[in-house]
Every structure is written in structure tokens, then in C-alpha cells.
Image (cartoon, rainbow, N blue to C red):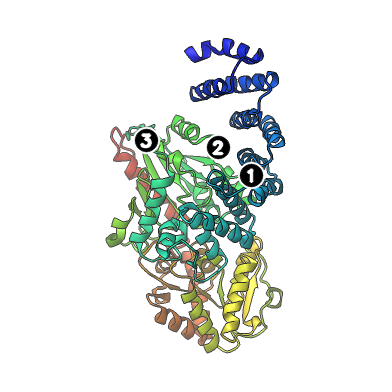
Amino acid sequence: MEIAENFGTTVLAAWEGRLEFAELIDYTTRLESTGLSPLAAVLYQTWLSRTQSPYAHAVNFNLGATLSNLGDLVGAEAAYRRALAMLPVFAQPRLNLGLLLERTGQMDAAMAEWKWIVANCPRDEATKPLVQLALNHLGRVAEGRKQFPDADAWLIQSLLLEPNQPDVLHHWVFLRQKQCAWPVYADVPGVSKEAMREATSALAMLSISDDPKEQLHAAEQFVATKLAKDVPHLTDGRSYGHRKLRIAYCSSDFCLHPVSLLTVEMFELHNRDQFEVYGFCWSPEDGSATRQRVRAAMDHFFTIHQMKDEDAARLIRSHEIDILVDLQGQTSGARANILAYRPAPIQITYLGLPATTGFPFIDYVIADAFLIPPAEARYYSEKPLYMPHIYQVSDRKRQQGPKPTRASCGLPEQGFVFCSFNNSYKYTPEVFDVWLSLLTKVPGSVLWLLADNPWAESNLRKVAESRGFPPERLVFATRVSPENYLARYLIADLFLDTFPFNAGTTANDCLWMGCPLVTLTGRSFGARMAGALLTAAGLPELITYNLADYEAVALQLANDPARCAQLRTRLGDVREHGVLFDTPTFVRDLESRLLELVQALPGAVQAAAV
């Protein structure tokens, strides 16, 4: 309290012009360290209004940072601009001004500030780290705006200034995957291939390695460098003893996103006699029908995008949630630090990241015995929570559009149509080689791919053209509504899966629409997703375990239209009667498992079986 009690005499000294710059900085630093930032802002403003000083630019910068932290973005912007008017090459306020403009949605203006730093600030030891930050921000925002070549150029410039930047490397690696820029680990001066692999994110590693041990290591690297340390746990692991279990789902993907497209009917079908369903959401409102269905399916729905992690965790804890299900993992938009506070006695990960999260505060991962064989469970930080039939839930209410014509999709009127509508970052040169080999062996056939971004399309076409394929043998499908996307499977003959990062939701869609799928299965979660679905569908003959067999099965089907027709008939029967799409049974099985987990907690009251 002593520092607050001295505020009156200190602000009076500032008003009278008697407070030295060093005294100002020392006192405001102590104010902010004790949570008295509003008083620090008042003192900065008083000093600036009453003092002529060559350090006014620095004080305006400090004032801007303080006001920004207090949420006064207008005042912060004005302070940063005053600092820059006094000293244009002052990189810190220009860097922060860019972040503030980004925060308010002024992306072009933000990037202009960072570009000014790159173009005008020296590369001396004092300023070089700030130039690197400007380059990194430019790369990050350009990637988010799908300006991939620009993002690539900015990140390479940053790495040339300082090669030892694991965060930059992991963004750059994933950026190259999205563009199908092969080899992904390209030469960068001063950066070894080992450093690139070490920096590869858990998500990007899924397309690089089929080794679950290596994927665990990638996940643990994130945990070691990014997660909050030593945060207080908000629960003690004991049961609340509720008559109805409170299950909460948390995600940034409660919108038009594959996770919600799969799970929305599960939320709707929970047994309300025994479960109370909560949703904690930090995704923006996208106005989609999917978002409205998700929201309507929850008994309680909270938007927490403006809350700090600890405040969000305390909100979850205040509702005495028995089981918290994370639908995010280490994917874009994740807020793992919320779960680090342990706001629920049981915490589960599901669907978001098709691999181990590495999070020490996640207890279980929902799986099946094909997806995570018991022998591989040691490479997961979570315990597998085994479902009896299939790990993946489905939405039986999904709508399909009218069957398109081949011409409307850019397909030839005749010829076998291989397709693969996975994201471009799942494509790999080894599997693409097999696809091109199939085009060679099946005259008149075409390969129908997702037009994820123009640079991936260009790079894939270059590879195909270098092998002598005319452009029309590769057809790229633009993104359309979910209904029209599903209808495309009605005119595709065979889906070719990617490896080692299989189709997940896309495989579910493909099989739902009756399109046969050939997969290559490996050891990791990501490399076993489509195989798990095919196992549940009773089609193990479409699962292969090496590239030669993968190509052989696909070629056999391409040369046997009658067999493809039989598979469509079988998939139609699976859709109506099989366990793969039996969502009510899936929900009952899941609820039984969840009930067992809660009843095993200390202090649990035994409940009737679901």
C-alpha cells in the first residue's frame, strides 16, 4: 500500500515539473507491477502535459502500452502516434501500433507499420530483434490471409536475420505443406534439417511422420515452450455427486467447421435424464445453420472469446462440470491453458488433433482399438477411452445438394474419376507419385483434387506436367457449400486417401455418400483414421499397409466398374443399418463410458446404468 499512498505526492511533483524521467519510470514500473496500471497511466499523462523532455517519445510509448493493456485502444493509438511523430525510427511503438491496428481489424494498416520497420530500421544489435518481430508478424498475418508466397518471403527474411527461431520455423514448415512446396524441408542458410524437424508442430508432423513416438515428441515440445507453468488446479479430482452428470464441450470450432459438422447430432442426442450439456465457445458467430444447431443442442452455451484463460477456467469450474471435453487439441485457435487450470475432475480430448496432445492435464482420448492399438498406447500422454465400434461420431441429418453434372465440375464426360478432397497440407510427394502412376495405368482417367490455394494447385500441376501429363488430367474443385460438396461424391468413382495423414471427416463424408475409399494405414492416429472407418463399415479389403498394395487395390477397382458399383451398394446398406453411422448407439456407448469414469471418482454416487 505504501506505493499507492505516495501517489498523491508523486503526481504533484509531475504536475509541478519536478519529477525526473528516471523517477517517473521507476515509480510507474512499481505501480504496474502491483496492479495499479490506471494510476501509472494518470502519472504518465500528467508528466507529459507538464514536462518538456527529450525522453517524451519513450514516455508516450510506455503510456500507449499501459492504455492498450487497460483496453483503451483509442488512447493507446494516439500515444503511439505521438511517440512516432517525435522519433519516426522508434521501432517499439510502431511494432505495437501494428498489433493494435490488427486487433481492431485494420490489417492493411497494421502491415504497413511493420513494412515501414523492415524498410527503414537499421539491423544493429539493438534493433534487429524488432525487425525480426515485424517480419514475423507480416508472415503470420499474410499466412492468415492466405497470401502464402508473401508469408514465405517474410519468414525467410526473418530466418536469415536469425536462424534460431523455432516458432518461425514451425510456421514456415506448415506454410510449405499448404503450398505442396516439396521438399518441405528446403534449404535455408544457417538452419539444419534437424532443426526444422525439431521445430515442426504437432499438426504439421502428421503429414511428415507415421511414428507415434515422434508425434508425441512434437506435442511435448509445444507443451514445454507454450503452456502456462505452475497454474493452480481448480478441482481436487473428487466427484461433485450430481444426479445428472454435467458434460461440457469446449472449442473454437462451433461454427461451419468439420468438428461441428461431425458432432452436432451427438450434442442433440445426449440423454437429458442423465446428462446436462454445456458448451464453452470462443469462435466468432458465423451465422451458419451449423452454429445455430450446435447452440440449440446445448442446455447451456457460453461465449468466452473475450475472457482471459484463467477467467474462462474459473467460469467452467463455477458450473461444477463433471467432464470437460476438449475438441481442439493443438490445432489453430486452441486455448489449452484453460484446461491447464483443471476446471473439471475429468478432462478428455476428442477429434481436434488426430494425435496425442501431450497435455499433462488431459486424462483420456476417445478412440477405438483399430485407431490406437493397445501396443501403441504408450506413445499417448492420454489414456485411450475405447469405444466398442468406432471412435468417430456422425451426423445423420447432414443435407446433400443435387447431383452435379460432370461438365459443371470440369470433369470429362467419360473416364474414371479418382478423387482426394483432403486439405493440400496432407498431400505428400510419395503418395502423389502413386496417383500419377494410376493416371498412367488407367487411360482417360482424371484426378479430382481440392483447390485449396492457387500455389498448391500450381505446384501440383508442375509436378504432373514434368511427368508428361496434360493439364486436363488434374481437375481442381473449388470450395462450395457443405451440401454441394457432399453431392460431388455422387460423380466420383474412387477416393484415394492421403498418407501418413489420412482423411478424417472427409472420409466420413465420402463413405456416407457411398463413394468407395482406398486407404494406406500406418502406426499413428492420423494414419489409421480412414482404416478405423472402413473397419466399422465392414470393408477391410479397402485397407492397405504399403504403397504397392495401395496402388494395386486402387488399380484393380479402377478396372472393375462392377466391383465399384457393388461397394456403393454395400455402403448404402452401411449407411442405413451399419454401426459406422449409428449415432444413437454411439452416444449411448459414449455415455456409458463417461458414467463409468465419473463413478470411479472419489466421492462418486453410484448411478443407474445408462
Are circles 3 and 2 on residues that touch, CB within 8 Å? no
Query: What amino acid does circle 2 point to?
Result: Ile
Q: Quadrant of the C terminus?
A: top left
Q: Residue at x 55, y 61 (%)?
A: 175
Whichever of labels 3 and 1 marks the residue nearer the N terminus, that label is 3
Query: What amino acid does circle 1 point to?
Result: Glu
- The part of the image, by quadrant, that contains residue 145 is bottom right
Q: Is residue 211 left or right of 183 when viewed as pictured?
A: left
Whether residue 397 appears in this view of the structure is: no
In whole angstroms, how far apart are the C-alphas of marks 2 and 1? 12 Å
Which of the two residues, 141 or 129, is positioned nearer the viewer here? Answer: 129
- Secondary structure category for the residue under label 3: loop
Q: Is residue 493 left or right of 609 when viewed as pictured?
A: right
Whichever of labels 3 and 2 marks the residue nearer the N terminus, that label is 3
Reply above or below: 23 against 150: above
Q: Which residue is mark 3?
A: 230
Q: Which mark is residue 304?
A: 2
Q: Disc 3 vs disc 2: which is toward the camera? A: 3
Q: Residue at x 52, y 25 (%)?
A: 29
Q: Residue 184 location in percent, x, y?
A: 49, 67
Which of the two residues, 435 or 363, is positioned nearer the viewer here? Answer: 435
- Secondary structure category for the residue under label 1: loop
Whichever of labels 2 and 1 marks the residue nearer the N terminus, that label is 1
- Secondary structure category for the residue under label 2: loop
Q: Which residue is mark 1?
A: 285
Q: Disc 3 vs disc 1: which is toward the camera? A: 3
Crowdedness of circle 1 by 10 Å Cα count: few (<14), some, many (20+)? few
Query: What amino acid does circle 3 point to?
Result: Asp
Q: Residue 540 location in percent, x, y?
A: 39, 73
Which of the two residues, 67 or 387, is positioned nearer the viewer here? Answer: 67
Q: Residue at x 58, y 61 (%)?
A: 152
